[in-house]
Amino acid sequence: MRLRARLLGRIRAFFAQQDVLEVDTPLLSRFAATDPALDSFRTQYLGPGAPGGLQLYLQTSPEFFMKRLLAAGSGPIYQVGHVFRNGEYGGRHNPEFMMLEWYRPGLGHHALMDEIDALLAFTLQGIRDYQPARRVAYRDWFQDHTGLDPWSSDVPALRDFVERNVGAVPVGMDETRPSPWLDLVVTHWIEPRISDPALFVFDFPPAQAALARLREDPVPVAERFELYFDGIELANGFHELGDAAEQRSRCEADNRLRERSGLPAIPLDEYLLAALAHGLPDSSGVALGFDRLVMLAADLRQISAALPFSLQRV
Amino acid sequence: MATYSTNEFKGGLKIMLDGDPCSIIENEFVKPGKGQAFNRVKIRNLKTGRVIERTFKSGESVEAADVVETDMQYLYSDGEFWHFMHPDTYEQLAAGESAVADAVKWLKEQDVCLVTLWNGVPISVTPPNFVNLAIAETDPGVRGDTSGGGGKPATLETGAVVRVPLFVNTGEVIKVDTRTGEYVGRA
C-alpha cells in the first residue's frame, strides 16, 4: 500500500512537471469499447431521468472520454483511475484494475515512447533500475523469433508453426483470420523468450490496429506499440486514429466480429464520433497498467499481491 | 456428457484429453490487452503420470473425466491382478499391472493405498507415504557399526531394494519413504 501511494505520488509529480493536466472522467457510460477482445460489465440506472431504465457500461479504459476532452481543446491530459474488464482474472489480471492513461497532442508514437521511458525512470528511481527500453518493429520481432512474416503469413502457416513448436492447437480457434493466431504465437512462443528488461514493440499488423492510425510504409502498418517490462505487457499506445469515418467503420467491423462470436453488439459512441468529426488534434496516447507497475516495482509474482483487495477478497 | 468451461479450471480438476483422464496441476490465464484470451494449463495424464502443457482458447469447454480418488485396503495379488477393498463398503476391485505400475514394490497386504478410479476402474495406485516392511535379505551386519554411514542394499519382503545402514539385519522391519525409496528407520 505504501509503495502504491509512493508510485502514484511520483506519477502525479512527473505530469505536474510536464504540465500535463490531470482529468477525471466517468466510469459509467451509455457506450463502451467495441473491441471483440474486451468484455464490458453492464449495469442499469433506474430513477429520475430514466424511468424506463438506462443501460450503462463500466469503462474498460477512459479512452473515449479523454478523446472527447482532447477534441474540445483540453491540451495534454492524463488520468489514473479504475477500469473494468469482465472475464479477466489470473496471475496478471484482475477484472477491476487501475490504469494510467495519457494523451499528448503533437507527439508521434516514438516521441511518446521517449516520454514513457522518462516517466518510468523518474517513478522507479531508488526502487528499481529502469533503462530506456530497446525498440523493435513488430515485423522484425516476429520474424526473428519465428522466421515468419506476420503480414503475409496465413492461418495454415501459423498453425503449422504452432504445431511444430508450441504443441497441440487450441480447439475453437478462428480459422478465418490470422490475428488470433498471431496472438497465440506471441503469447506462447515469443513473450516467454523476451530477454530485454524493457522492450517496446511498435508498428503492428493493420488487423491489430485497434484505434491506432495506419501508415503506408509501403505496406500498411498500424502505429501502435506495446511496452514489455520483465516480459510482462505493461503499456499499450497508439498514434491515435482521428478520422471519424474510419473509426465508425472499425467499430462496425468490431460489431460484426462480435456478432459472429456470439457476443452482444455495442452501441456506437456517437458523442465520440461527433468529437472526431469536429477534429481530434494529432495525438498519441498510452494506457499503462498501474497494478502491474506495482507488481514489477516490488518484484511480485501475482497481481493479487499488488492489490489491496483482489477479486477473491471483494 | 459433463463438461467444464475454462472458467472452471483449477488445480485438481479432472478432464478428458486425447481420450485419457487427466488432472489439472496449474492453470494460467494468458491474454494480451487487445487480443485473444487463452488458458495455458499444466496437466498430468492420470494413466501414464506424464505431465504436459496444453493451451485452451478461453471460453471453450472440455469433457469432464469421471475420476475418483479413494482410500482402499490392499488385499492380495493373484499374479495377474492386485485386489483392493473399500474399507467401508467392503466392495472389492481388481487393479491391473499398468495401474499398479511402480507401486507394486511397496504393496503390503492390509496397507491402505490411494486408488484412482476412472469410470469405476482403477487406473493408478499410490502407496502410503511410509510403509513398514521386513528385510528378506541383506549382508550380515558389521559388529559395532551404529553410525549408519555407508550402508548396504537390502531386499525387502515385497521385492523392493533399498539402501540400509550396516547395522540393520535380515528379518528386521524397517520404515521406508515410498516417495523417495529411502530408509527412514527401524520400525
Image (cartoon, grey):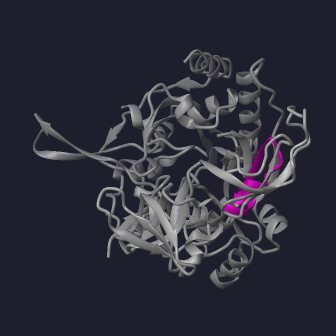
Q: Is residue B37 visible?
A: no
Give the camera-side residue of A68 and B55. Answer: B55
**Quadrant showing the N terminus of chain A:** top right
- Residue B46: name its quadrant: bottom right
Residue at point 80% right, 70% down?
A: A146
Residue at point 35% right, 65% down?
A: A263
Give the camera-side residue of A190 and A32. Answer: A190
Q: Picture coordinates of residue A190 (x, y %)? A: 74, 60
Q: From this view, report whether residue A214 is shown above or below residue A224.
A: below
With A209 as the anchor, is B159 left or right in this view?
right
- Residue B8: name its quadrant: bottom left
With A299 as the anchor, is A178 left or right in this view?
left
Q: Is residue A190 visible?
A: yes
Q: Picture coordinates of residue A185 (x, y %)? A: 68, 67
Q: Residue furthest left?
A: A51
With A258 as the anchor, is A14 left or right in this view?
right
Q: From this view, report whether residue B147 is shown above or below residue B115.
A: above
Residue A125 among magenta residues: no
Residue at point 36% right, 52% down?
A: A269
Q: From this view, report whether residue A169 is shown above or below residue A113.
A: below
Q: Picture coordinates of residue A143 (x, y %)? A: 81, 68
Q: Picture coordinates of residue B106 (x, y %)? A: 63, 59
Give the camera-side residue of A207 and A144. Answer: A144
**Quadrant showing the C terminus of chain A:** top left
Please give the range of residues in magenta.
A188-203
Residue at point 83% right, 40% down?
A: B167
